[in-house]
Image: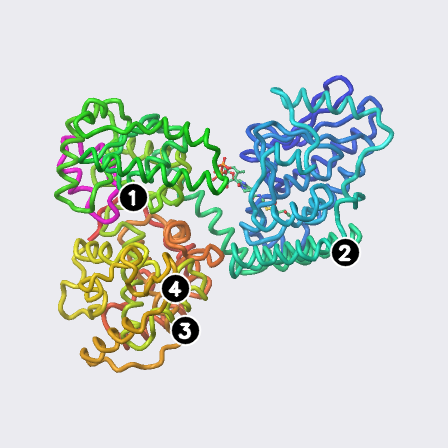
Amino acid sequence: MSELVRTHRDGDVLVVEIDNPPVNALGPGVPEALAAVLDAADRDDGVAAIVVRGAGRTFVAGADIATLEDAAWGDEAAAADLHDLLRRVEQCRTPVVMAIHGTALGGGLELAMAGHYRVADAAAQVGQPEVNLGIVPGAEGTQRLPRLAGVAKALDMCVSGRPVTAQDALAAGIVDEIAGEDLTASAVAFARRVAARSSHPLTSERAERLGDPETNAPLLAAARAQAEKIRRHQVAPLKAVDAIEAATRLPFEAGCRRERELFFECVRGEQAKALIHVFFAERAASKLPEDMAHLTPAEIRTIAIVGGGTMGSGIAMACANAGLDVILTDATGDAVAAGEAAIRTNYDATVARGRLTPDAVADRLARIHLTPPAAFPARAVEADLVIEAVFEDLALKQRVFREIDAAARPGCILATNTSTLDIDAIASATSRPEAVIGLHFFSPAAVMRLLEIVRGSRTDLDVLVAALAFAKRVRKLGVVVGNGPGFVGNRLMFPYMYETQFLVEDGATPAQVDRALAGFGMAMGVFAVDDMAGLDVGARVRKALGHFSDPRERRPLVHERLVAMGRLGQKRGAGWYRYDEPRKPTPDPEVEALIRSLATDAGIAARTISDEEIVDRAILALVNEGARALEAGVAARASDIDVIYVNGYGFPGWRGGPLFYADRRGLGEVLARIRAFHREHGERWRPAPLLVELAERGGTFRGGALHGRAGARSR
Ligand code: 3H9
């Protein structure tokens, strides 16, 4: 028997275990092995029922995503294997009970739904997350799920991609029973109870939950509207709705054929390539490099946070949400109280949205110990990690680090949340620079998934490993970056922002630029982002990074003027836009007139700017600087830059990140465009040497730009 599938007997029940680590994906060999076991069981009169489960930590987490990338899918062979398997499962004479623990996702849930019954562990989750990979469920999920759970639930699960809990799945009719402590024992007992029945339910034959055209029409319309809203520009969610609509209109087999067509349209498309790239890029980014794999991360249970402002209070919530204890302080008692108020307001809003119960909030609040500054040194000794989140000012941070250094216990990790300052300069204020690291959270810190982990020149490997484990613990995507100006994210952000400011001086308007970037897929336009972050913040960072110290460089004309006018963005009701209603930008003729007048004074004649030029100048500025960041070693891999941009800067995942986008567009074409900008606009567009090298040898960032670990300080 194949090692991918093991069996043992529990009396007259055959227990089948799929064992394909790490997540029992339905990779090559698994469908055949499972089908062979079922064939043998059907021939064995001593087997009254079959229980199928996954070995290790989970049931089947889906088709093998690596194979989705393969050309193998082009000839449809692997998909056909899965369909054959599902038919084989459903047509088993012996009843098949799927025993689900961990996550039954994608092809995993599709396999489970082909069984006659499903028993789930209380902590299990099930879902059809294929849209996250740019595809639709392709192994009958869009046909079986509405038959089990009804059209509305199937639409929600397939469009959102969000898994549901075992309890939710029970209520929806996806599973038949929640197991006791021992999943296998519960599933075996369930199997014995149903074995004697004269017939067993076949999902493919059920129609009672498929509704009728009249009731389905508004559900389908709402799902399409939802897809346009939450997954703008994406193809797969709309096709998932099409596939579910087919389930409501066609017999099972014909519906499956329609689903397969839609699946192949998606899997062969650009969006799937990009999203699958992001899936693997995220996992590569958060993995320990080989030279650190032997290190065991120190456990972090208690975190002290210095600074209760927006970032500090958000970080406190992220830690408390993950069940960690937090000691939160600030420079004054009033500031601590303000931090507490901000935390309470945020949690109240979460309760109002129905995302948390008041009890869960009470539990989280109880983990956050508000500590007046005078009491902090005595409490800081309890901390395994101290995170400084004070104002972005080097001298202030150095002073705070001296105080932390004096208070923290030996072995404690000292982290700064700086978004731009030099980690080594901060570390130099302490007696233990090897314990200092950057943890650059993104705002709002309780929500945003990205965490840049900044390695200083003296940071210990143990500290880096512990920081990566901490990121995972607080459900963040930790990406290790080097200690260069702006690290990776902000380093790329500035050329992008400046270029858009030049674009408005050249003749575009902020609203046109933002519209063009939203059309490209950016979550928000750049001017709207600047207004949200605060123009004063950008100005301070620009100063700290020493931009435009060379008088020959073109310097943006408008930003400084807006700051001087007090137009600091949303918080002042005016920035690049006007805000008559909170958070709702309205183009402001006053700003447009100011831009024109400053540009005219500088001798810039307004011209018509196309959306294509806007997108190219903005996005290729990211690409060129991304190549420089790779060259400088502040990013270890091209895919790390993609992960940072998709998770922290609203770059569309379905384009795979800036460097994946450049790869797909073709580096030759990208280089030609950048060279043209160089000729037209001067030095800031000089092509990065790495880009030139890769383009000239027909390479790609993905295939040809793997550097060593991020860590060297650049520039
Ligand atoms: C599908 O099923 C299509 C069908 O409808 C139709 C077909 C015809 N395949 O995330 P982790 C690897 S599409 C291959 O760090 P966690 C992952 O790369 C699929 N590999 O762990 C990593 O490898 P490595 C639909 C997979 O505990 C390791 O497992 N299913 C797959 O944080 C650990 O992963 C999905 O979209 C896979 N399907 O989370 C589920 N899944 O160690 C995607 C994982 O070498 N997976 N790996 O870096 C997940 O959401 C999470 O991995 C999971 C575990 C929740 C399962």
Alpha-carbon distance for marks 4 and 1?
47 Å
Is label 2's Cβ within 8 Å of ligand 1? no
Tag 3 residue: 611
User: Callout 1, which amino acid?
Assistant: Thr
Residue at the spot of label 4? 697
Q: Could you tell me residue 251's position as x and y percent? A: 80, 52
**First of labels 2, 3 by sequence position:** 2
Task: Count neighbours of disc 1 (C-alpha within 10 A) and say few if under 14, some if 14 to 19, many if 20 or more.
Answer: some
Q: Which residue is mark 2?
A: 249
Q: Is mark 1 within 8 Å of ligand 1?
A: no
- Observer-nearest residue: 293 or 192? 192
Label 2 to label 4, Cα distance in Å?
Answer: 52 Å
Q: Which quadrant of the figure has residue 383?
A: top left
Place of residue 215 in the rendered image (x, y in percent of width and height, measured from the top left): 72, 53
Which element is circle 2 on? helix
Outermost right residue: 198
